[in-house]
Amino acid sequence: MRMSLAAGVALSLFAAAAQAQAVDPKIAARVDKVLAKTPLIDGHNDVPWGIRQRVGIHPEKVDLAADTSGLKEPDGPGMMTDIPRLKAGKVGGQFWSVYIPSSFDGPVAVQMTLEQIDIVKALAQRYPATFEMAYTADDVVRIHRAGRVASLVGIEGGHQIGDSLPVLRQLYAAGARYLTLTHAINTRWADSATANPQHGGLTAFGRAVVAEMNRLGMLVDLSHVSEGTMLDALEVAQAPVIFSHSGADGVADHARNVSDTVLAKVKANRGVVMVNFLPNYVSRARMEWAADRSAEQARYNAPPFGGLYIGQPDRAKAALEAWDQAHPKPPVTLAMVADHVEYIARVCGMDCVGIGSDFDGIGDTPAGLDGVDKFPALLAELARRGWSDDDLGKLAGGNVLRALREAEAVAKKLQATTQPSYATLQELDGKR
């Protein structure tokens, strides 16, 4: 019997997932030993926004102690995170993404950011046997040793500081330990990877933001930013930077991934690139498929006047379903994520790589990495490829812990000699 293309792809994905689960017991024991010693720290998880999308600012309405995989958004996946799966995944530290869409700006963006931080703290208060807030590298180590998950706050977008260095400081005081300089669009002081260049990188105010983050001890996160912004930030930074959820451009050419040119500078900076799981970033073939599908969708139903089936949603839906049947998604697997990890380690060094899943912020996952319980499978794949226990520990959390410690040390020195900056966007860039 001849198998359809769609059935063949599905079978390949099933085989890849099955292979990821079939871990040699000796390798599994090694991974367990590594994660008992070093906390596995994920650089990016969007549970706070996932909660807000489902129940608003009511985290008490989502029970993370139960299986959350059935809690779906409209036309979206179930949640990828809950306490049973965090325990199965041996997660020791989590940067919870305090994300709000880039469409929000000014005072409302600051308010929503504080509400998202409150959700993170509410989870720690509600589940004290599982979560504890962490503000320093020492906190992470202590909390991991106590058998809990160290909960850290990462702010996913420079638009969330309201173009204000005093607001930046107060968000640090509220617990934020990294700030992603942009999200999907440019800020008034930094270019995004996914928008047309406006500033050529960082403006003078943008450089002041990076300098003040160094003075505070807040990690500068360069995921989502343009290469110009990456290079400018690396020029200014006195402490290690991070990429909380990005891949290697040398494996999959994508604006959200990191080029070899930047990786060389990250190595000199002693920074860390935490590898993302979003299939479109992991695989160039998947990215091209997604672009083709978006174009086809617009062809069927492009408002206000275009589209083959404009005003005929049933016909447009049926046409897209037929296109999907004829053009199945190219498979993306755990092994392909491991390829990104190995590439970054090869170009930038073993001290340069970490894990930044983007769970609960992505609509699809690689086969074998469908939730927070699967992190050990990724480490097992790398162990199978010959990684030592020491290098697995660096990847799991050792590297980002080291970067956080170094950022804390730089902040201590700067605070002894440098006063807080009160520079404004208007003063430095001539903008209101």
Image (cartoon, rainbow, N blue to C red):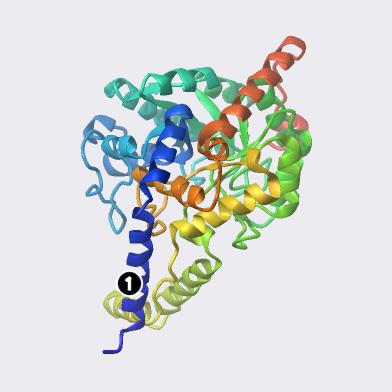
In which quadrant will I find the C terminus?
top right
Residue 108 visible (yes or no)? yes
Residue 99 visible (yes or no)? no
Q: Residue furthest bottom?
A: 1
Q: Residue furthest front?
A: 26
Horizontal side, residue 299 vs residue 212: left or right = left
Question: For the residue marked with disc 1, what is the amino acid?
Answer: Leu
Horizontal side, residue 412 vs residue 358: left or right = right
Query: Residue 174 placed where, x, y %?
Result: 49, 20
In which quadrant will I find the N terminus?
bottom left
Query: Residue 38 placed where, x, y %?
Result: 48, 29
What residue would you read off at disc 1? 11
Query: Residue 242 placed where, x, y %?
Result: 62, 38
Query: Residue 257 placed where, x, y %?
Result: 61, 54
Judged from the image, the secondary structure of the residue bearing numbered disc 1 is helix
**Crowd rating for badge 1 (residues with CA inside 10 Å; few <14, some 14–19, many 20+):** few
Q: Quadrant of residue 213?
A: top right
Q: Name the residue at 39% across, 58% down.
A: 364
Q: Name the residue at 36% across, 23% down.
A: 147
- Front one among 51 and 368: 368
